[in-house]
Amino acid sequence: MSLLLRTGRHDTHRIFAGLLPLLFLIIVSSSPTWAQSGYEDPNDPKLFTPSQKTNKSWLDILGPGHGPVRQNSTQSDAHEDVKSFYHARYCLSCHEGQQNNLHYARTTLVCRDCHILKPVAGIHNPKAAAFAEHRHEKVCAKCHEGAGPGMGSYVIHEKRPWSQQTREDFPALYWSTVFFLALAGGVFIFFMPYTTVWAWREARQHWENRHEKRKEPEKRVLVERFTRSERWMHTVLVISFMALSVTGVAWMYIETGLGKTLALPFGGGDGAVWVHRMFGLFLMTIFTAHVVYLIRSALVGKKGYLSGPDSLVWTWSDFKAVHQHMSWLFGRREHPVFDRWSWWQKFDYWAVWWGLLIVGTTGLLMFDSVLTTSVLPGWMMNVARWVHKIEAILAMAHIFVVHFFIESYRPSAFPLNAHIFHGAAELEALEKEHPAWIERMRAEGKLEERIVTQPPRAVQIAFFGFGLSMVALGLLLLLGMLFFAVDLSF
């Protein structure tokens, strides 16, 4: 399987500063306004009593319900003792953010659609529509036909996943969110300064060598870098990833101008979701076929798939290459000598594996909520949604900034290296970045077999235009996500 697009530019590091805030901006809602409303704080600890939940299985230990319970949650009127409730005009006067959840933002449901009784009964009152024992039947099944008891444990008004309240009441959501936020943060804490120094190093090097003359395009020798099947696989991956990114952002931001605009070509939010799911299934099918192909190749003993210089499997020499390349950035050592693949190309390849496994698994869990909750508790959907969201943001941010920088618009490849599409790379460039591979091809007598002619001008323009449009679309999506993040509802 070939690698993803290549991009990057000297001033790309300016975008890096927005990547980590992006992960938090789009998952942090606005601060509560109850204090300015003149009403009682509904989260005042004095209004709660310790939870009486008993754990029957390991799923109960991880699931919601461990935190304190509101004192009036068993009353026939949950607001009977709440100061000034009956003088409040809107629920949001006290419950800031309660309507800002998926059901409100994306289906226009309001409180009375689920909390049917008036006055509103506490959810622990057996007569309340939202009582745990019959919530799936009296509330969930109104929209989710065939909803079973498992769906009743889905947490509609979840607290911020990283909050202390979630840590106490919903351990699975808290720890999964914290883990993936730490993973995303770790990736960018490493790559943001790394690529910034890399851009500076290459820019300085190009300035020092600015007087060197390059060969005329027609005199340059081209070597086949990627086979036809690898190029097709990469193109399918690019198209699928961009389609998933556009439709995913459209749905995540559907209550904002960005989401509505992105959803227009698909007929609105529902159409964007349908396209997102279809491309998700398609990409998981392609990924499964790739895994089966690799297993089959390994079993029949095809040379170089799991070991050797043509393999994408990490070895100890790749870890040493990371250290040597970092030293080269600061002028302390020579540039590492790479064979067919550099360490960052191997990283990107395996990042696709981990991303598809995580995003694909959580996406399948959310594909059919009724089917999923017939097997698993509904609160697993809360966990899947946040893991899916964070991992998807990490994937987009990494591809659109780090991967694009490394593989395309860094100074040595600016403005776009399209050989991943037409397969031909300049021998002169390969001798600088992959000298060990070129020498090995010469020694084995295979280099001449890989010499190819320059693709037709029209083909070059088409590939260049396609690649550059993908780069532009990715960066515009990131900027739009940053700009509209403050308007999101959760």
Image (spheres, grey):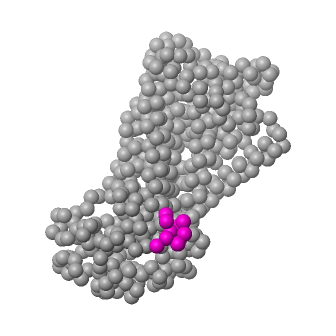
Residue 279, given in percent of the width and then of the height, sits at 59, 57
Residue occupying the far top of the picture: 211
For residue 312, above or below residue 127: above
Residue occupying the far right of the picture: 300
Residue 384, given in percent of the width and then of the height, sits at 51, 61
> The magenta stretch spans which residues?
54-62
Q: Can residue 303 be seen in this view?
A: yes
Please give the name of the residue rendered at 55% of the width and 33% of the height, measured from the top-left corner: 407
Image quadrant holding the N terminus, namely: top right
Residue occupying the far left of the picture: 38
Residue 113 vs residue 117, the one in the foreground? 117
For residue 444, above or below residue 295: above
For residue 352, above or below residue 75: above
Please give the name of the residue rendered at 50% of the width and 69% of the height, measured from the top-left corner: 60
For residue 302, above or below residue 425: below
**For residue 88: magenta?**
no
Residue 167 placement: quadrant: bottom left
**For residue 61: magenta?**
yes
Residue 385 vs residue 121, the one in the foreground? 121
